[in-house]
Image (cartoon, helix red, strand yellow):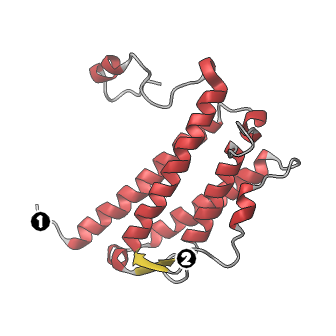
Amino acid sequence: MTTTVESIGTLVLDDVALTFRRQRELVERALEQVSDADFFRAIDADSNSIAVLVKHIGGNLLSRWTDFLTTDGEKATRDRDSEFVVATDTERDAIMRIWTAGWTALFDTLSTLSPAELVATVVIRGESMSAVAAMHRALAHVAQHVGQIVLLAKHYRSTEWKTLSIPRGRSADWLAAPTSPIR
């Protein structure tokens, strides 16, 4: 099989999109298990609630992926500090709209990128990098917050938590039938 730069670029774009989809799915499956009270709850005064993390991810994705190749990823219109504040009268749906807008910007942009654009120069907070480096930076950032959200959701649900992966003690079951998801 002959491998071309374009086919490698296509593989990179497809894998980045798949990995982002999986990260989004993890959070959304965790959020399904969390009450509104726990969604807005912080474990202490210096910690972020799930709502704050969801709002921040949405705002970050919207800023980074809007005009990805042509403008600084830190948009002048973004109020990053406000992403870490959730007013007491805020509804969960309002936060989820920010989440959705960010993911829409990301997936819309990824669907239009070509393999050749992976080497384009992208700027984030005045720092130049390749588009592929900016993608990996974004993936790492999102994954960090996804882990925080899942940990908080699992903590709040305690013994009622439905695992997002292979449950403890069930690895042998999965190995016996790896095509059927065990949850």
Left or right: residue 62 versus residue 4 is right
Left or right: residue 22 versus residue 82 is left
- Toward the right, the furthest residue is 89
> Which residue is denoted by mark 2 in the rendering?
125
- Toward the left, the furthest residue is 1
Looking at the image, which residue is at 52% across and 81% down? 126
Left or right: residue 128 versus residue 100 is left
Looking at the image, which residue is at 59% across and 74% down? 74
Query: Which mark is drawn over residue 150?
Result: none
Q: Earlier in the sequence, mark 2 or mark 1?
A: 1
| Residue nearest the observer in this picture, 130 or 67 | 130
Looking at the image, which residue is at 47% across and 53% down? 20
Q: Where is residue 32 shown, x and y percent of the image?
A: 65, 35
Q: Where is residue 73 shown, x and y percent of the image?
A: 55, 74
- SS label for mark 2: loop
> Which residue is denoted by mark 1 in the rendering?
2
- SS label for mark 1: loop
Amino acid at dot 2: Arg
Q: Where is residue 152 shown, x and y percent of the image?
A: 62, 35
